[in-house]
């Protein structure tokens, strides 16, 4: 849903063959079906990114269906935590780190292995957050995970650029997604004034605006870009 759905649709329109991987079987299959009904080419693969066996199978099924893997976008995440460090809930912390940080590392591991086996390079895009650049109050696990995603991105770029595998990160600002709306409702925050606090443009981003950044990083138009973190945040990190 949200950025993942918009990205899958945009890449399909650009004639990419798309593999949607998600823990939500119903929504994932529905999105793949929608792409196929509109003339695209997509499949759905169940994957819990915190489980290495699932991640390995995701890449394997991609190659079985389409023969190769050229671009990977690591976007899976869960709702941020909402307590400062002294009130940290260990179970919530572990869950968030497992999905938002370890999940990215596991995906990179198996995506890079496949790209190395192909010997023709590739592009990996990790979705971090402005919280990976500038912390928010009472989000220690989420902030730590998203900072970590930027670190993983730099490490991957450093190690694998010699194989023409480009690895970059996007740091979205406040994007109008079901996850954001749910978090605002949970924290009892009024969306309209909050949007103005989080953007020079005075609004939330649309999922498609993040998807276009991913499409650019996936394409040869960004052939000299690796190890970068690109904020797509309406100017928030410059405020």
Image (spheres, grey):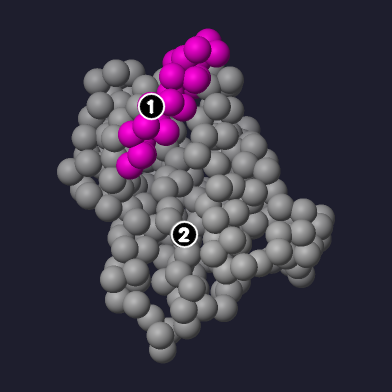
Q: Secondary structure at mark 1?
A: helix
Query: Image quarter for residue 17?
Result: top left
Residue hosting label 2 = 79
Q: Nearer the viewer, residue 188 or 137?
A: 188
Horizontal and vertical percent for residue 191? 71, 59
**Dot placed on the residue nearer the N-terminal end, 2 or 1:** 1
Q: Which residues are magenta?
A: 16-41
Q: Secondary structure at mark 2?
A: loop
Residue hosting label 1 = 29
Residue at the image point whose x is 29% and y is 40% from the top: 47
Where's the C terminus, which quadrant? bottom right
Q: Residue 187, relative to residue 179: is it above or below?
A: below
Q: Residue furthest right?
A: 201
Q: Residue 45, relative to residue 159: is it above or below?
A: above
* Residue 3 forms part of the magenta stretch: no
Q: Is residue 175 left or right of residue 108?
A: right
């Amino acid at each position: 849903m949200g950025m993942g759905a918009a990205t899958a649709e945009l890449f399909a329109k650009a004639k990419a063959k798309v593999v949607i991987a998600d823990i939500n079987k119903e929504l994932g299959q529905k999105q793949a079906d929608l792409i196929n009904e509109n003339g695209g080419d997509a499949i759905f693969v169940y994957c819990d990114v915190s489980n290495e066996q699932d991640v390995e199978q995701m890449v394997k099924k991609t190659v079985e269906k389409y023969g190769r893997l050229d671009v990977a976008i690591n976007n899976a995440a869960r709702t941020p935590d909402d307590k400062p460090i002294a009130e940290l809930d260990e179970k919530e912390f572990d869950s968030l780190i497992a999905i938002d940080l370890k999940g990215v590392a596991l995906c990179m591991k198996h995506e890079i292995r496949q790209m190395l086996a192909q010997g023709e390079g590739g592009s990996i895009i990790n979705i971090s957050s402005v919280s990976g650049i500038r912390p928010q109050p009472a989000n220690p696990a989420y902030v730590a995970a998203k900072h970590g995603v930027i670190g993983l991105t730099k490490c991957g770029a450093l190690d694998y650029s010699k194989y023409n595998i480009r690895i970059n990160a996007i740091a979205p600002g406040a994007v109008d997604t079901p996850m954001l709306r749910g978090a605002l409702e949970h924290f009892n925050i009024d969306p309209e004034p909050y949007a103005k606090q989080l953007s020079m443009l005075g609004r939330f981003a649309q999922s498609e605006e993040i998807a276009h950044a991913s499409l650019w990083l996936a394409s040869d138009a960004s052939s000299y870009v690796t190890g970068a973190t690109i904020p797509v945040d309406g100017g928030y990190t410059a405020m």
